[in-house]
Amino acid sequence: YFSGSTDEHIRHVPVFDEKVVGMISIGDVVRAIVDQQHQEVKQLKKYITGDYY
């Protein structure tokens, strides 16, 4: 959904749970992805260095 959203200048989309419960922005998605990637890199570095216990 978000891939076409930038072409149409859509920056926010509603979040539904039988009714609208909030809005999410592209910035929210980007932050979540970056945070997830940082955690993954941190875990991989620990694994590589043997510091994962």
Image (tube, rainbow, N blue to C red):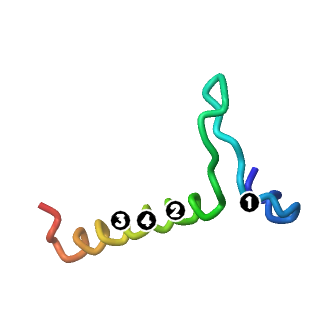
User: How far across and how far down the image is residue 9, in percent?
Assistant: 83, 63
**Amino acid type for the residue under numbered disc 2:** Ile
User: How far across and how far down the image is residue 37, in percent?
Assistant: 44, 67
Secondary structure, mark 4, is helix
Secondary structure, mark 3, is helix
Q: Say the numbered circle drawn on residue 11.
A: 1
Measure the alpha-carbon separation of dots 2 and 1.
16 Å
Measure the alpha-carbon separation of dots 1 and 4.
20 Å
**Residue plotted at (22% across, 71% down):** 46
Q: Nearer the viewer, mark 1 or mark 4?
A: 1
Q: Are marks 4 and 2 in contact (CB under 8 Å)?
A: yes
Q: Nearer the viewer, mark 3 or mark 1?
A: 1
Q: Which residue is mark 4?
A: 35
Sequence order check, earlier mark of 2 and 3: 2
* Crowding near the residue tagged with mark 4, few <14, some 14–19, many ≥20 C-alpha atoms within 10 Å: few
Which residue, as the protein is rendered here, is positioned at the far top? 18
Q: Is residue 6 left or right of residue 44?
A: right
User: How far across and how far down the image is residue 19, in percent?
Assistant: 66, 26
Q: Is residue 9 left or right of residue 34?
A: right
**Amino acid type for the residue under numbered disc 1:** Arg
* Crowding near the residue tagged with mark 2, few <14, some 14–19, many ≥20 C-alpha atoms within 10 Å: few
Q: Are marks 4 and 3 in contact (CB under 8 Å)?
A: yes
Measure the alpha-carbon separation of dots 4 and 2.
5 Å
